[in-house]
Image (cartoon, helix red, strand yellow):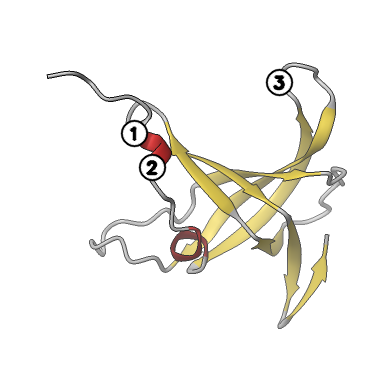
Amino acid sequence: MAELVKLSHFKKFDNKGFFGPKKLLLFSMDEWRDFDTKKVIGAKLNTVIWADNSDYGDMRVSNKGRSMVVKVAGLKPQPVESPEFISLRNPRGTIYGEYQNQLSVKADGFDVIQGNEGNAR
C-alpha cells in the first residue's frame, strides 16, 4: 500500500472551539524574526493558558497551565510590566509535529482584558 503525502493540508483546526473557552495570560513579548532574512517581522507573545473550559471528551484532560507562543505580524514587542489577561484577534492555529501535538499560533493582534473592557494592541 502506498503512503499518501500532504494529508495534514486537509486537516482543519477549529480555532473558535479551541481558543473560545480559554483564558490567556500574557507574560512577555519577544521579537519575531524571519527565519531566512533574520529581519524583525513582528512580535511573539509568550502566554500561559490560565483557564481551559474546553470539552476534550474527557474531564481529566486540560491544557491549563501550558505555555503557548502567539505570533503577531507587524507588532512591535513591548515590555510587559505585569502579566495581563488578553484575548486574541482572529487567532489561527496549525497543528504540526510527528505526533501532531504541537500548535503554531498566529493572530492579527490582541486586546488586554480589564474587567469587561479591553485595550487594543
Q: Position of residue 108 (x, y in %)?
A: 72, 54
Task: Please name the amino acid that badge 1 sits on.
Answer: Leu
Mark 2 Cα-neighbour bin, 10 Å: few <14, some 14–19, many ≥20: few
Q: Nearer the viewer, residue 77 or 48?
A: 77
Residue 46 x/y as whole percent? 67, 44
Labelled pair 1, 2 in contact (Cβ < 8 Å)? yes
Q: Circle 2 sits in a helix, a strand or a loop, which is it?
A: helix
Q: Quadrant of the C terminus?
A: bottom right
Marks 1 and 3, how far apart at CA = 25 Å
Quadrant housing residue 30: top right
Q: Looking at the picture, does residue 50 appear above or below residue 47?
A: below
Residue visible at 84% across and 43% down? 77
The residue to which callout 3 is attached is 35
Q: Determine the CA span between mark 3 and mark 2.
A: 25 Å
Q: Which residue is mark 1?
A: 7
User: Quadrant of residue 116 in the image?
Assistant: bottom right
Image depth: mark 1 or mark 3 in front? 1
Of callouts 3 and 2, which one flags the residue occurring earlier in the amino acid sequence? 2
At which x and y percent is residue 54? 39, 65
Secondary element at tag 3: loop
The N terminus lies in quadrant: top left
Report the Cα–Cα distance between label 1 and label 2. Answer: 6 Å
Q: Which mark is residue 117?
A: none
Q: Earlier in the sequence, mark 1 or mark 3?
A: 1
Is residue 19 shown above or below 105? below
Residue behind mark 2: 10
